Amino acid sequence: MGAPPDIVAFHVGIVVRDLHAVMDRYQRMFALEHWHRREPRPGLPMRIAYGGREGTGLAFELMEPVPGEPRDFPPE
């Protein structure tokens, strides 16, 4: 088995409670340069943000369910 490549591409999807707080944290932790956001709409009851860094293959998809919709977090 050889050594892993220098750049490993991956995409991670994560459900979060506070989209903007996690975007800020991940931007600082992983030096993410670009974020693209989508607001809720019929058939997609969640806020979504895609973040990544050019040339690395590193990408995160953050999903914040809209309260009261079927995909909401369970009550605490």
Image (cartoon, rainbow, N blue to C red):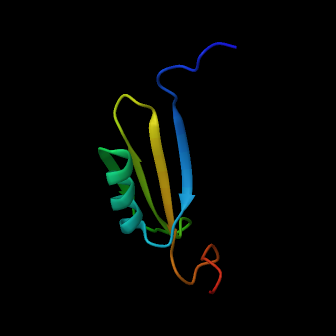
Q: Quadrant of residue 58?
A: top left
Residue 3 is situated, as x and y percent measured from the top left of the image, at 59, 16
Relative to residue 58, is residue 42 depicted above or below? below
Of 28 and 18, the residue lying toward us: 28
Residue 70 is situated, as x and y percent measured from the top left of the image, at 64, 77
Q: Quadrant of residue 40?
A: bottom left
Identify which residue is drawn at 44% across, 72% down: 18
Relative to residue 68, is residue 23 depicted above or below? above
Identify which residue is drawn at 61% across, 77% down: 73
Q: Which quadrant of the figure contains the N terminus? A: top right
Q: Farthest residue toward the bottom?
A: 76
As drawn, is 1 to the left or to the right of 49?
right
Identify which residue is drawn at 34% across, 33% down: 54
Residue 21 is situated, as x and y percent measured from the top left of the image, at 37, 68
Q: Farthest residue toward the right?
A: 1
Relative to residue 71, is residue 75 depicted above or below? below
Of 73 and 37, the residue lying toward us: 73
Q: Farthest residue toward the top?
A: 2
As drawn, is 76 to the left or to the right of 19?
right
